[in-house]
Amino acid sequence: MTRPSLLALGLGVYSAVAFSAPLGDLRVTDSRGVEVVVRAPVRRIVSLNSDAAEILRAIGARGQLVGVSNLSGKAKSFWGDMADIPSVGDPFGPNIEKIIQLKPDLVLAVAWRPGPDFDKKLKEFGIPTLRLDCYDPLRVLKDIETLGRLAGREAEAAQLTGFLSGIRERIEARVRTIPDEARPRFYTEIYTDFACAAPQSGSAQLCVMAGGRNVYTDRPTTHRPTVSAEWVMAQNPDLIVRAVGGAGGGGYEGDSPKPLEDARQSIMNRPGFARLAAVRAGRVYVIHRDIWLGPACYVSVAYLAKYFHPQAFADMDPRAIHLEYLRRFHGMDRAGAQAFP
């Protein structure tokens, strides 16, 4: 994999550029709806959230990361130059002593984990915690803007949000012209068998943005309610989307689509599924978690839009969009195997 120099990408100069503005209090509404006051620009950041770490690198703030959680969910080849940043352990149960030793000005975490005792403990040492999910398709652009303000990288964040919002707006403009009755009914399965995407979940939002209608219409307390094979067969969706990840391969781990192809085939081979409209039409699709949610989520929407409405999006090349994101914001020139077929 060829990587341009950080300087060539505008990602390597941190001190004089990033911290030219004086420190000041910045009021931020976090992913729980809680207002948090942070002293900005933030010089030393520990991120327990890998999506936030991806955004910070994309906006040129990699040098402000002094600690990260285990950067799971994406291959080592994706993180590249992040490997030398000290790890503070599991994102939902990190090593608090190690975080304190790193003397961060701010710790980033997702909304609900670790629990509130984590924030209280760090507060005793004068370290604030900011809960930003950075994965919700409806909020990720705002989260990028917030991280840009916190890191003193507003201009770089604006470049990233401009690129991503351009993808989203292009898709939404076409989807708006498609009548409801022409939008396929989708069943989306998230990472494990029969873990369905509830309407309020980010996973369902991706599919709705792409011009689909969710067969699951209840609003349970969990974003991934478990359903049964019989339930899926009773709904008889027009198409099936499965998000995959973990140790099964695919994603940035390699260029072979076989792990994704195997996951697709295993769904199609389930007892009774041969009768489903989606399976009969071959409309079963697999997307890797590397792009499913987080800052690259609109790449997933591009794939989904093409799957859902192939004629309306015949000219869209999701892989090319993904490569542009990687080249412009991460200095990478390969995307791996992210979707099948």
Image: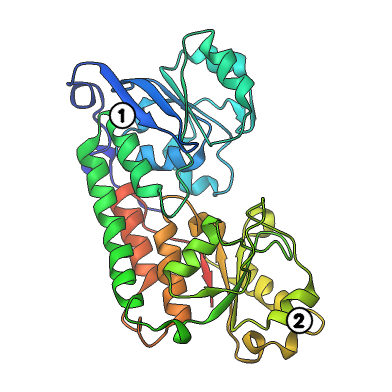
Q: Residue furthest right?
A: 271
At label 1, counting other C-alpha atoms closer than 10 Å, the crowd grade (few under 14, some 14-19, many 20 or more) is: many
Q: Which residue is mark 1?
A: 151
User: Would residue 230 be found to the left or right of residue 211 on screen?
Assistant: right
Amino acid tagged 2: Asn
* Residue 258 percent coordinates (x, y): 62, 71
Work out whether 136 lies above or below 174: above
Q: Is residue 103 visible?
A: yes
How crowded is the residue under tag 2: few (<14 C-alpha within 10 Å), some, or many (20+)?
Answer: few
| Circles 1 and 2: CB atoms closer than 8 Å | no
Mark 2 sits on what residue?
A: 269
Residue sitting nearer the eye, 219 or 130: 219
Q: Quadrant of residue 281?
A: bottom right
Camera-side residue of 32 and 125: 32
- Tell me if residue 185 comes above or below residue 281 in the rendering: above
Q: Which mark is residue 237?
A: none
Label 1, label 2: how many angstroms apart (C-alpha)?
A: 49 Å
- Of the numbered discs 1 and 2, the one sitting upstream in the chain is 1
Residue 175 at x, y percent in the picture: 36, 76
Task: Give the vertical position of 297 relative to 211 (above or below).
Answer: above
In percent of width and height, residue 2 lies at 36, 52
Residue 155 percent across, percent down from the top left: 19, 39
Quarter holding residue 270: bottom right
Amino acid found under the numbered disc labelled 1: Ala
Residue at x 59% of width, y 13% of height: 121
* Along the line of sight, the residue nearer the viewer: 204 or 262: 204
